[in-house]
Structures are given as structure tokens and as C-alpha cells.
Amino acid sequence: MGFDLDLLLIFDEIYKTGNVTRAAANLGLPQSTVSLGLGRLRSHFNDRLFSRTAKGMVPTPRAQNAIAEVRRAVQALQHALADQPVFDPAASTREFRICMTDISEVVLLPHLLNHLRQTGPGIRVEISKISQDTPAGLADGGVDLAVGFMPHLEAGFYQQVLFDQHFVCLAAASHPRVGAALSREALLRESHIRVLTSGTGHAIVDKILAAEGIERKIALKLPSFLSVARIVAQTELLAIVPFRYASEVASSEAVRLLPLPVELPRFQVKQHWHERYHADVSNRWLRQSVANLFAD
């Protein structure tokens, strides 16, 4: 098994802190990434390396014997990486390939493009839709980054939480029967739009509503969220959508955001990437730009 710098840093940080959560925070990595890294280290060394005790994660004799070599390897790699060229976005003509949900195209993409115009006017972007093929695209190098709510990318990829989301109801500003609040009766009575997204987890809406004994009257099914706001504004149909999407479209369409009379689960929008691009300087710059723009 090959080692990268992150694995060695994970070893060293757990050794220093005796705590996986604290090690993740110090390294700026998700706890899940550090836990996966520890699993890879244990497999390589064929040893637990750190045993959980009342005093924290205590190094085994194997870890104690290896720590000096690990730290020497970290220093050597950091010295070698220090000679890497710095990515200059202002001079770059690189094309980034980003997979997005259709909601991210509406909510995030315009802001990202405006940022790139200011910081890297020669940079080009190719957008593709999130699908069940996205993990393979990230792994084989066809995709640099995936952004959105994508439960099927939770395992096996680096990830960073950008912000939390919750659901609201979108209604026309002039809707004749829906006022400032949406009752359970109105939710049942009115006709709805359902978006047939795939791979983004929005099917949870109907599952939770069904558990609450609510079956929506679906009058229109759409393949994406791109036209939802315009249709809602010009009809009497309702749509259950993520809050940031609703906030974004409310600035350009005659729609209202209404709290739902039932509680739906919150979810997290993240950016995901494969380990092959983890250390690439241009991809690191892109991920940092996305985090600076959108992270809560």
C-alpha cells in the first residue's frame, strides 16, 4: 500500500493528541476521513496502533517504534512538496470539470463564475449533472469536484461540508388559497410539483410525508428544479424545495417561501473529491474558493 502525506500526518496527529476528533480538527479534515485513514494505517502495519482507553487513544508498542520514522518521512515529504509550483489563477487557462445537482447550478454556480471572472478570467468550467456515474468519474479523473447533496458519495471520497439545508414550500405570491402560513389541510388540498431527481436524496421528502400520513396530489412531474420557480410563480401549484434554492429564486420570481406544517430532516450540502486530486495545487485552490464562497 502506498502512503501519502495525509496518512502520515494522521498517524502523527493521533499520536500527539490521543484523540481522533481533535486530530481531525487540527488537520482540518472531516473526522470520517481521519477514521478511514486510521483504518488504512492499521491494515498496513497489521496492528491497532492506538488502543482506546479512558485516557484517550494510547499508542501500541508498534506505533511507538514507528513514530520516529513517520515524522522523518513527514519532514521529507513536506520538504519535497515545498518545491511545487504555486497555482496562479490569474494566469491560468485550466478547465475544471465539476459535477453539480441542478439546485447547485441555480444557487451556487453563478456566484462561483463571478468569482472566477475576478480571480481567474482565463479559467474555464465544464458542468455535468450529478448521477450514479459520478463516483466513477471522480475516480477515473473525468471529474475534478462534485458539489451538492449526494448521499451516494458519503463513503470513499474526501468531503467538506459547505452548509446545512432544510425544506420549505414554494407558492405563487398571488396564490388565492394559501396565505402567510401553510396548514396541513392546505398541503393536502393543493396540487404539487414533484421533481424526479436521481442520486441527490430528495426522495426522502415523500417518504417522510408518507410516514406522517400525507400523500401529496402530484399534478406535475419534472426532471429537474431548473423550471420549478417559474412554473410555481405562474400557476397555483406548490413545490417543496430546499431553502437556499427558494431564497435564490424568490429574488427573480413572484413566489413566497412558506414553512412546512410537518418537520422534514435537514441535510448537508458538501463538496466531494477523489484522493487523486487531493494534493493537486489547482484543485486545492478550486476547493478553497468554493469553501470561501459558500461554507457557513
Image (cartoon, rainbow, N blue to C red):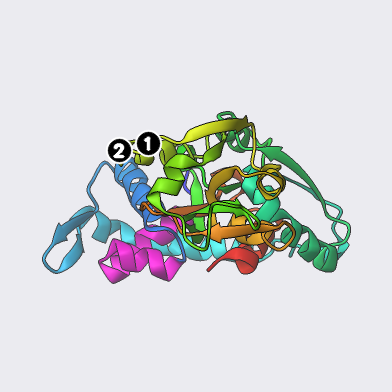
Q: Nearer the viewer, residue 285 or 193?
A: 193
Q: Nearer the viewer, residue 128 or 110?
A: 110
Categorize mark 1 by other alpha carbons within 10 Å: few (<14), some (14-19), many (20+): some
Asked if residue 10 is among those painted magenta in the image, a careful observer would answer yes
Q: Quadrant of residue 115?
A: bottom right
Q: CA distance from mark 1 to mark 2?
A: 6 Å
Residue 137 to residue 183: above or below:
above
Q: Which residue is mark 1?
A: 207
Categorize mark 2 by other alpha carbons within 10 Å: few (<14), some (14-19), many (20+): few
Most extreme residue toward the front is 176
The amino acid type found where label 2 is placed reads Ala
Q: Which residues are magenta?
A: 5-27
Task: Tell me if residue 95 can be seen.
Answer: yes
What's the residue at 84%, 63% (across, down)?
117
Residue 129 % position (x, y): 66, 37
The amino acid type found where label 1 is placed reads Lys
Task: Tell me if residue 155 can be seen.
Answer: no
Asked if residue 272 is among those painted magenta in the image, a careful observer would answer no
State the quadrant of the N terminus: top left
Residue 153 to residue 159: above or below:
above
What's the residue at 52%, 63% (across, down)?
180
Q: Main secondary structure of the magenta part?
A: helix
What's the residue at 33%, 61% (across, down)?
67
Residue 126 % position (x, y): 77, 43
Q: Which residue is mark 2?
A: 211
Residue 165 % position (x, y): 49, 57
Q: Nearer the viewer, residue 264 or 185?
A: 185
Residue 240 horizontal side relative to residue 87, left or right: left
Residue 75 % position (x, y): 50, 66
What's the residue at 74%, 65% (across, down)?
86
Would you say the residues marked 1 and 2 are in contact, meaning their CB atoms lie under 8 Å apart?
yes
